[in-house]
Image (cartoon, coloured by chain):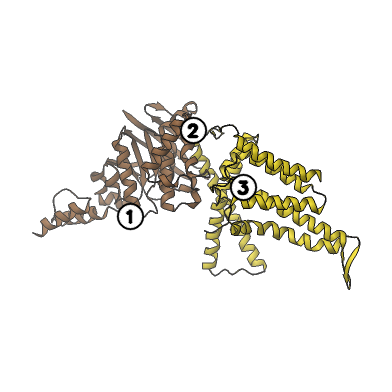
């Protein structure tokens, strides 16, 4: 079943900036997809279309139902959105209230709200911080808290706008692991990111966006295309770059590794 | 970022902290009014003693109390200093063209006592329960939901704006800006403040989008609270008794 279908999305901001020019794609249930594109390519604008915050020309379908004015509440219970800046997302005085905001709006019973809140806080490693004010949390904690506020709604589709930006390497890995574990539980995930090195750890498929979808394929197929990536001002993952260079020099002919341990093994084999 | 946090000690285990916020707000507000209406020194001093006793019972550290009280005292002191010299009445002491009047001294002491007592009680209202608990209690007592939301969001974002303004100030200093008492400084600070307002507007749009995406439809559902316990009523009776005694004097 298609979890998300976007057909020919066109959107311009009031100042005339054209953000989307006919973007079309679809994502199956349970897929984890990375949305890559340079600054100003329309990533955030596209994501805001997926739960009806922005509505331009074109059609968006969630679980087969087209987004209309009448079903916005349902759409927002199906598509959880994590914003790029956690301070946009953490608007209540305490973390517990922020995480319970979505479930309460969904009309869950108080017991169900508490259960959802403690699960979301546990999943993001924030259990002991529930009584804290967001302004007393570190940036990394606020990033995870922003994810928790959406997790607590248990949406079947999650949309994450640069969830790893400004995080240290360990926190980035934790976010990638969290995305994978959510996918394993059946959540459909679309993640906008600039971090090509992290994409193989959190997604199986890549959409390249430059106001419209310019490439769509599995991670290996897209991230190893130097000209395509370079043409959009994006960098290939470091290991992919190295092994593609070796391939171009006819030194290497195997599958491009994305993990350091596999790459190390391939290099040792080459040196033998 | 360091700033005064009124609810820093809102989770202590004192009798004031365990008091139901609705009963506490009503009782302490009545006491504040009683003290504010006191027409002579004696009831005002009695009110001050009650306020100090309640602060001591609350076990809020005195350093925190002092940090909170410096602002009302800064506001009250000029008034207290000028009144003895500017109020007409019996002259107690005179030096050249300055004279201290008995009535002026009386009003000065009265306003200072009433102001300090009221500020201490206000600290108890805001400092012995998390802000959100206090605001929700106000909503349960009839504060309109829209006002509740304004207070909740203002409380959350005032710290963020403070942080952003501090970052802007640091950025200005890094670019060689030095605060002086001149037009250039005023213009630069005005532009920084204007930029802060624009950022606030953009932030508010982003926050609104985040709220919509989590199912916001104009109100924030607040879980219900249990009725008042006997201990809450007992504490309220004691404080209201003190308030009516002050009013009766």
Locate residue A59, reporting x and y percent: 41, 31
Q: How many marks?
A: 3
Is residue A55 at all visible to an observer of this figure?
no
Q: Which residue is mark 3?
A: B126
Q: Which residue is mark 1?
A: A169
Name the foreground residue: A225 vs B93. Answer: B93
Relative to residue A223, is residue A116 drawn left or right?
right
Locate residue B49, reporting x and y percent: 71, 53
Name the foreground residue: B24 vs B140. Answer: B24
Helix, strand or loop at disc 1? helix
Q: Residue at x 64, y 51 (%)?
A: B55
Locate residue A158, reporting x and y percent: 38, 37
Please give the chain letter of the residue carrying mark 3: B
Mark identifier at residue B221: none
Q: Residue at x 66, y 51 (%)?
A: B53
Relative to residue A271, is residue B11 drawn left or right?
right
- The mark nearer the N terminus, 2 or 1, is 2
Circle 2 residues within 10 Å: few <14, some 14–19, many ≥20: many
Q: Which quadrant holds residue B244?
A: top right
Circle 3 residues within 10 Å: few <14, some 14–19, many ≥20: some
Cα distance in 3D space between marks 3 and 2: 26 Å
Q: Which residue is mark 2?
A: A104
Q: Residue at x 89, y 73 (%)?
A: B96
Chain for colour yellow: B
Name the foreground residue: B214 vs A258. Answer: B214
Please give the chain letter of the residue carrying mark 2: A
Cα distance in 3D space between marks 3 and 1: 40 Å
Chain for colour brown: A
State which quarter of the image contains the C terminus of chain A. Answer: bottom left
Residues indicated by labels 3 and 1 sit on the same polypeptide chain: no
């Amino acid at each position: 079943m298609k979890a998300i279908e976007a057909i020919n999305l066109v959107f311009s901001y009031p100042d005339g900036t054209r953000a989307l020019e006919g973007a079309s794609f679809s994502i199956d249930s349970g897929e984890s997809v990375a949305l890559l594109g340079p600054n100003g390519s329309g990533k955030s604008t596209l994501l805001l279309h997926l739960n009806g915050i922005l509505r331009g020309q074109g059609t968006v379908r969630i679980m087969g139902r087209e987004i209309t004015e009448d079903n916005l509440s349902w759409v927002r219970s199906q598509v959880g959105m994590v914003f790029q800046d956690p301070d946009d997302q953490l608007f209540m005085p305490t973390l517990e209230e922020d995480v319970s905001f979505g479930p309460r709006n969904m009309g869950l019973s108080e017991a169900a709200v508490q259960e959802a809140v403690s699960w979301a806080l546990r999943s993001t490693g924030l259990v002991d911080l529930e009584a804290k004010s967001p302004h007393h949390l570190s940036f990394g904690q606020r990033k995870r808290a922003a994810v928790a506020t959406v997790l607590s709604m248990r949406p079947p589709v999650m949309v994450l706008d640069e969830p790893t930006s400004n995080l240290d390497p360990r926190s980035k890995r934790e976010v990638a692991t969290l995305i994978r574990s959510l996918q394993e539980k059946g959540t459909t995930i679309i993640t906008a990111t600039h971090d090509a090195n992290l994409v193989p750890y959190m997604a199986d498929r890549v959409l390249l966006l430059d106001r419209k979808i310019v490439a769509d394929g599995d991670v290996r197929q897209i991230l190893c295309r130097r000209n395509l990536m370079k043409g959009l001002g994006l960098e290939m993952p470091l290991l992919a770059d190295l092994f593609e260079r070796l391939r171009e020099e006819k030194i290497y002919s195997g599958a491009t590794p994305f993990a350091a341990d596999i790459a190390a093994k391939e290099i040792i084999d080459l040196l033998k | 970022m360091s700033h005064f946090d009124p609810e820093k000690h809102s989770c202590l285990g004192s009798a004031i902290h365990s008091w139901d916020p609705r009963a506490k707000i009503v009782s302490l507000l009545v006491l504040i009014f009683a003290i504010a209406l006191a027409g002579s020194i004696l009831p005002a001093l009695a009110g001050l003693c009650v306020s100090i006793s309640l602060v001591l019972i609350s076990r809020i550290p005195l350093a925190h109390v002092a940090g909170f009280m410096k602002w009302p005292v800064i506001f009250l002191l000029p008034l207290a200093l000028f009144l003895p010299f500017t109020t007409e009445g019996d002259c107690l002491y005179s030096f050249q063209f300055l004279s201290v009047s008995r009535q002026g001294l009386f009003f000065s002491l009265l306003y200072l006592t009433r102001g300090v007592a009221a500020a201490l009680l206000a600290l108890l209202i805001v400092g012995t329960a998390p802000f959100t608990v206090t605001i929700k209690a106000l909503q349960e007592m009839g504060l309109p939901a829209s006002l509740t939301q304004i207070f909740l969001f203002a409380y959350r974002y005032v710290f963020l704006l403070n942080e952003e303004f501090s970052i802007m100030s640091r950025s200005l200093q890094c670019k060689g800006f030095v605060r002086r008492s001149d037009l250039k400084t005023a213009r630069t600070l005005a532009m920084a403040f204007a930029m802060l307002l624009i950022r606030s507007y953009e932030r508010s749009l982003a926050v609104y989008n985040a709220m919509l995406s989590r199912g916001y439809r104009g109100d924030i559902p607040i879980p219900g609270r249990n009725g008042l316990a006997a201990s809450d009523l007992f504490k309220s009776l004691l404080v209201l008794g003190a308030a009516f005694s002050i009013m009766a004097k």
